[in-house]
Amino acid sequence: AILCSTQSTATRRRIILFPLPFQGHINPMLQLANILHTQGFEITIIHTQFNSPNHSNYPHFTFKPISDSFFDIESQLKTKTDAGYILQYLNGICEDPFRDCLAGLLAEYDEGSISCLITDAGLYFTQAVVDSVKLPRMVLRTSSLACVLSYGALPFSSENGYFNLTKEDSNYEASVPEFPLMKAKDVAKMTTNPEAMGSFVTKMLNQMKASSGLIWNTFKELEEDALETICQDFPVPSFTLGPFHKYFPASSSSLIEQDQNVLAWLDTKAPKSVIYISFGSVALITESEFQEVAHALMNTGLPFLWVVRPGIVPGSEWLEPLPEEFLERVGDKGRIVKWAPQQDVLAHPATGCFWTHCGWNSTLESICEGVPMVCSPCFVDQPVNARYVSDVWKIGVFLEDGLDRVGIEMAIKRVMMDKEGEEMRERINSLKEKVNVSLEEGGSSHQSVKALVNYISSF
Ligand code: UDP
């Protein structure tokens, strides 16, 4: 996409951006910052010291770290996945340092030279802070539109029973009336602490409504119906200008070094023959699930590239839980790395299937490269994304009953070898075409960038 600046250098105004300090949130926020920079805005990034972006990759931005005490969070993240609790804690500890930092910036720059603040939707506390200094706040929501609709519709409470369901319960497989696309068992996966999740979601949605506008990393043609509902439910303008990584790749905001050697290895493999496996930056799996993955990969006999993030199996450093002689047995057929250049891997002709946790960035990246998916969502928005991939867009297979070697092997074969998989590939390639059209001059995302720039310039 070609983006031309609409502002002369004499009138460049500044935008302050504040991401949530997690990989899947930092990537789209820094991509958005780059998009706005090309449109003629000066950029300041406020960030926590925990998971700090690498300043040297962004010499054209100004960075303002705020102090935080993340020792506690880091240790909790290794064993717990209670997003509702962690995100509320984060909102609490960031409030004072953020207020001081913002006051410093407002004093540093001439009045009127700062257009607005853009924060992650999860940083809901910032709305009250900007209200007190009369600065507009725009919100970046890094999930799908559908995720926000599901969050608004579902009752996050342990009383309704969804969150402590087991396979033996009769309604485990039933669709839920509040959001019929999802089954009760999908909802059960979203959180282990529905009260904390519900309290977080309510605050986030309320402060999105109180903001000056919403920016989404999605594109209109992908989520047309959801966009209509969002526009009715949220009384502020919505801008869908994604997928952001098509303007700027995510590699420069990667918090872990990406193993580039995998690309030469992929060069040695036949077209569409390799399974790429990654569960993103926060999902955890148990030791027995990890072993089921390993057995399934051996049993398929297909080449694979498996990202095993250190710490993904709580209690293990890295590859200790692998079955005996796994590495000898797979030989050059398989490759395990700590972190991959995911966008390049998905774009490589040898990659035939993406077995993913359905984080929103991963889902979009797969769509943009036309790679059909096997879905193993862990929590939060991932189950709803998986439902869209399998049931709405029909571009992947949902491993809805967890990780067992037989089920995994069948799902992979459906995508890689069956006629059904070919049809998924056709459908995802047609979405890939739609992405490209949306980014061209006159396309929906391209127009949204212009509309957003005009809107921000009007502040
Ligand atoms: N990613 C990467 N290398 C890997 C795995 C993931 O660079 O080995 C990137 C991926 O391209 C995506 C981000 O990390 O941009 C993960 O975001 P997502 O929303 O998919 O999942 P999360 O990590 O937030 O669960």
Image (cartoon, rainbow, N blue to C red):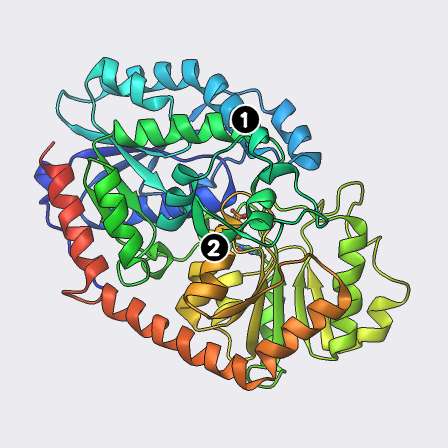
In front of the other: 328 or 442: 442
Q: Which residue is mark 2?
A: 385
Question: In the figure, 263 relative to 379: above or below?
Answer: below
Left or right: residue 381 versus residue 144 is: right
Q: Amino acid at mark 1?
A: Ala
Q: Secondary structure at mark 1?
A: helix
Q: Which residue is mark 1?
A: 196
Residue at x 34% of width, y 51% of height: 217
Residue 308 spot, x, y in % from top left: 69, 55
How many discs mark residues in the rendered view? 2
Mark 2 or mark 1, which is nearer the start of the sequence?
1
How dense is the environment of label 1, judged by Cα within 10 Å: few (below 14), some, or many (20 and up)?
Answer: some
Taking the image as drawn, is residue 182 in sight? yes
Q: CA distance from mark 1 to mark 2?
A: 21 Å
Question: In the figure, 179 relative to 295: above or below?
Answer: above
Residue 14 spot, x, y in % from top left: 21, 33
Outermost residue on the front side: it is 170
